[in-house]
Image: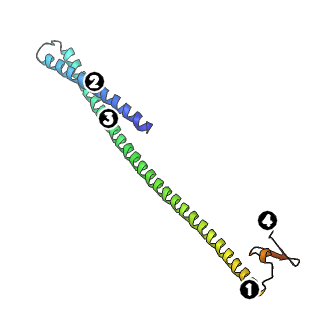
Amino acid sequence: MKSVEARLTVATQFEDRCNKLAGDLRLLNQQKAEAEKGKLEDDSAKLKVEKDLEAALAREKERDVELQHLRDREASLSADLDSSKKGLSEEKSRADKAEASLTETEQARQELIKLAEDSVKATEDALKEQILLLAPDFDVSLLGAWKEVVDGKIEDPPPEE
């Protein structure tokens, strides 16, 4: 963006120089008109004024071409900047959507884990009830869906690493 601003400054300075040259050109045209009216009697002075005028016209044409080139470049850079801003906005929108989707997926995963835990607990409770129905004096407090039988004893599973 600084590059565009720097180019705009250069273009403005260039335009100021062109305006000064235009003023110089008007002055030279005025001098030429005075020379044509006979105020300048020396032919060599008239010739010098004409040459200066031609040189000024040539420089003005060159500067006009350069100014147009700078304006075209500025327009191109401005269009590139607008395009980049639009692309950035689109990418940000996609990132926001992906983040929202990720949040939804994480929430769904947490709900699924909770549902699975509740299902295991409900199954465990149902099995304990069935065992108590068949053996009312049996101690079901040791039973659990995640417990293991090791050496004929019911134990908690080893901790996960």
Of residues 76 and 91, the one drawn nearer to the viewer in this rendering: 91
Residue type pointed to by label 2: Lys
Q: Position of residue 124 (x, y in %)?
A: 71, 77
Q: Mark 3 or mark 4: which is in front?
A: 4
Q: CA distance from mark 1 to mark 4?
A: 32 Å
The mark that comes first in sequence, 3 or 4, is: 3
Residue depicted at x 41% and y 51%:
86
11 vs 31, left or right, is right
Residue type pointed to by label 3: Leu
Residue type pointed to by label 4: Pro
69 vs 129, left or right, is left
The mark that comes first in sequence, 3 or 1, is: 3
92 vs 115, left or right, is left
Kindly identify which numbered label has been placed on residue 20.
2
Q: Position of residue 85 (x, y in %)?
A: 42, 48
96 vs 77, left or right, is right
Kindly identify which numbered label has been placed on residue 159.
4
Residue depicted at x 29% and y 34%:
64
- The residue tagged 1 is 133
Kindly identify which numbered label has been placed on residue 90.
none
